[in-house]
Amino acid sequence: MSSQKYSVNQHLIETLLSWVKSGEIAIPEIQRPFVWDASKVRDLMDSLYQGFPVGYIIAWRNPTVKLKDGTLAEGKKVLIDGQQRVTALTAAIAGQQVVNKDYKQIRIRIAFNPVDERFEVCNPAIEKDKAWFSDIAPIVSGEQKSHKVARDYLALNPDVNEDLVYERLDRLCDIIKKQIGLIELAPDLDIETVTEIFIRINSKGVVLSQADFAMSKIAANEDFDGNSLRKAIDYFCHLAVAPEFYTQIEANDTEFVKTDYFSAMRWLRNENDDLYDPSYSDMLRVAFTTRFNRGRLSDLVGLLSGRNFETRTYEKSIEENSFKLLGEGVREFINETNFKRFLMIIRSAGFVDPGMIQSTNALNFAYILYLKLKRDLGNNPNIERWVRRWFVMSLLTGRYSGSPESQFDKDIRAVHDTPFADHLAAVESAELSDAFWQIGLVQNLETSVVNSPALKVFWAAQSYLNEKGFLSKDITVRDMLVHHGDVHHIFPKNFLKGRGLSKAKYNQVANYVMVQQEVNIKIGDRSPIDYMKDVLDQCSTGTCKFGAIDNQELLRKNLQENCLPESLSDYEYDNFESFLLTRRKKMAEKVRGYYFSL
């Protein structure tokens, strides 16, 4: 019979708040900004007042840790689910400030009308209305005596029934005597089990990720400055998307501004590059994997708890070292030189727009690889080439699309144990055989999904090779990708729709080319055989109708760069299927040549 994995108990609201105040329950200052609208805080107070259930909160007690002197220290309860409710309680009842979505400290005041028994978010109008108590916090917390509050209220509202006011105030003050459920998970549970429990209990809510759990662990740790580390991760990711947020951090978090982390990310205040805007999960995964040579975030949770994987005990020294290593990994990640050089490598492979990168995990592992190889091999000139190839290989094969954690773990261990050149050669031999280039990639291009990795890599190849867009004399595919040029159907969409073809057929990616907008508009819905005849004519007459190509040699080169046939007969409607197959093969050949030139 399996052991009980959790305990369920009801606790008074005032007990819960006392645990928060004493630190028995760790509510990290910035575990997640408070995202509830003030109206939801109001509704929570109303539910408690009415005696309605307000759900459960879930906590997991940190495992007991062995200290250097041999004694044992029991950890705090780390809040896993229910942060918004607990934060709402501390805001409305204890009167504490909360951190909002903009990371500003704000006070949420909940007002109460004893006659109507209504709760509202306090506003200037309510504050001036003598029928309302503008802030319930000092009343419910006991900071103000209810009988004095009642006398003052009755003096302002002499027509209100005295007994009613006293009765309603007593009921308001009883909110802290109401109960809330606490599910406390056993300290010896692993992250997978904790996650499974969370999903089963909270199946309609937001699924807890291992990154969320790890971030909670980090923020709750006071001994090793976990809160600053947590902020570093959160703030960097926010700044990467919104550089203007920098001034808010400076104004609202003066303590963090003094840290080395903040100094290391100052460069982001003027940075608008959006090729790689990592989430906190991405950043955590990269920092962890590159420093610990492990790919499973469940291992990180264990290590941050001080787990010794061999003895299955928990030791303070392991906890301390894990926080130190993770901090080093975060500093490496946010380092301006590292970040910009990595993006330069990705761009140099032809990936010039974030829309070209459909796998963030491929980008994450490429950054892991760059940081690790740079640390291990210094300025080895092969690093850039290796990172480019690994990244493109990952995209082409969907390496991190299935079970990314397992693949991360497998890859980082191999990279750690084997000279990278040997490991890359082995992976290429297994994944990128002749069969892949001649059959597998051709089949991958048989799709109508415009976000197909195979198509994105093809466009990256054209960008890398500095090739021109369809019928363009001077404008490159790279320019069109950066400035979001048009995607043109060689056999126009409406032309094919008019002949009864389905969307899955006319939107085949082998029917796509990058083209200047004005060329695309001029072609419109014309038959490809017709407009290609005009293109040939303009090469003879020099009078350009479609694009600026005005001689046969330029046209031949342009068609070759775009993997298009030179014979007019290939643009006949009856040859559409053979056109697609021939072009897929040409596109795959181009990608193959591109890959091995990286």
Image (tube, helix red, strand yellow):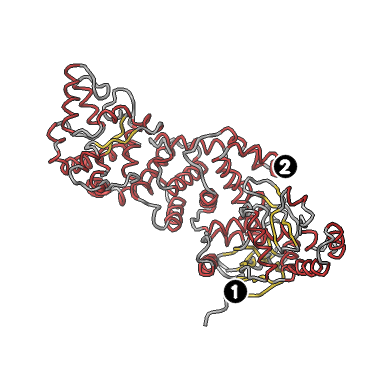
Q: Is residue 261 visible?
A: yes
Q: Secondary structure at mark 2?
A: helix
Q: Residue at x 65, y 52 (%)?
A: 30
Q: Is residue 287 visible?
A: no
Answer few, some or many: residues within 10 Å of disc 2's Cα (few below 14, many 20 plus, some between 14 and 19): few
Where residue 364 appears, as percent x and y from the top left, is 47, 47
Q: Secondary structure at mark 1?
A: strand
The residue under label 2 is 254
Task: Indicate the amino acid at tag 1.
Answer: Tyr
Where residue 565 appears, as percent x and y from the top left, is 18, 34
Along the line of sight, the residue nearer the viewer: 54 or 17:
54
Task: Indicate the amino acid at tag 2.
Answer: Thr
**Does residue 478 appear to the left or right of 209 in the view shown?**
left
Where residue 257 appears, as percent x and y from the top left, is 69, 41
The residue under label 1 is 6
**Does residue 158 appear to the left or right of 200 in the view shown?**
right
Along the line of sight, the residue nearer the viewer: 68 or 65:
65
